[in-house]
Amino acid sequence: MRWFRMAATAADQSETRGTRVWVRGRAAIALGYEGASLGVADVFADQALARSTERDLRQAHAAALRGDRTTALDLDAQGRRIYDTAGSYEQTSDYAVP
């Protein structure tokens, strides 16, 4: 978690809004991916300065792990709508998620 905090600090120093949001979204996904550190993942997701697909999908993943099927499906659908609008079809990587 120390690395993710350092990355967020560096992103803040860049004063670039997109970088700040992206770094926090990546940290939230990485920390929440295996179901470990969900609380810290929530903090990074909540710190994001703008709504992003990564945040929706990370929260959907966490809700699914918690057994909250309805919320997981709703957030997944919301993330999909955003991705369909803003997504990159040139790459097939989670790093290409807007």
Image (cartoon, grey):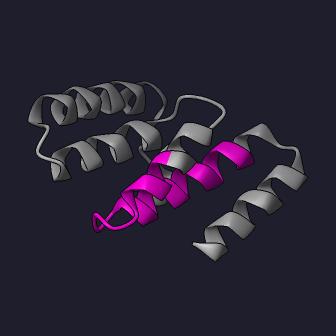
Q: What residue is drawn where x is 53% and y is 57%?
A: 26
Q: Position of residue 60 (x, y in %)?
A: 27, 41
Membership of 31 in magenta stretch:
yes
Boundaries of the magenta span? 19-42
Report which quarter residue 11 is drawn in. Answer: bottom right
Q: What residue is drawn where x is 51% and y is 34%?
A: 52
Question: 51 above or below 59?
Answer: above
Q: How many marks?
A: 0
Q: What residue is drawn where x is 33% and y is 63%?
A: 33
**Residue 7 left/right relative to 60:** right
Membership of 30 in magenta stretch:
yes
Which image quadrant: the N terminus?
bottom right
Question: 53 above or below 1?
Answer: above
**Magenta part mainly helix, strand or loop?**
helix
Q: Nearer the viewer, residue 54 or 82?
A: 54
Q: Is residue 88 visible?
A: no
Q: Is residue 60 visible?
A: yes
Q: Position of residue 94 (x, y in %)?
A: 41, 57
Question: 70 above or below 63?
Answer: above
**Residue 40 left/right relative to 5:** left
Q: What residue is drawn where x is 68% and y is 65%?
A: 5
Q: Position of residue 82 (x, y in %)?
A: 41, 27
**Residue 21 left/right relative to 53:** right
**Residue 63 left/right relative to 52:** left
Q: Position of residue 85 (x, y in %)?
A: 43, 24
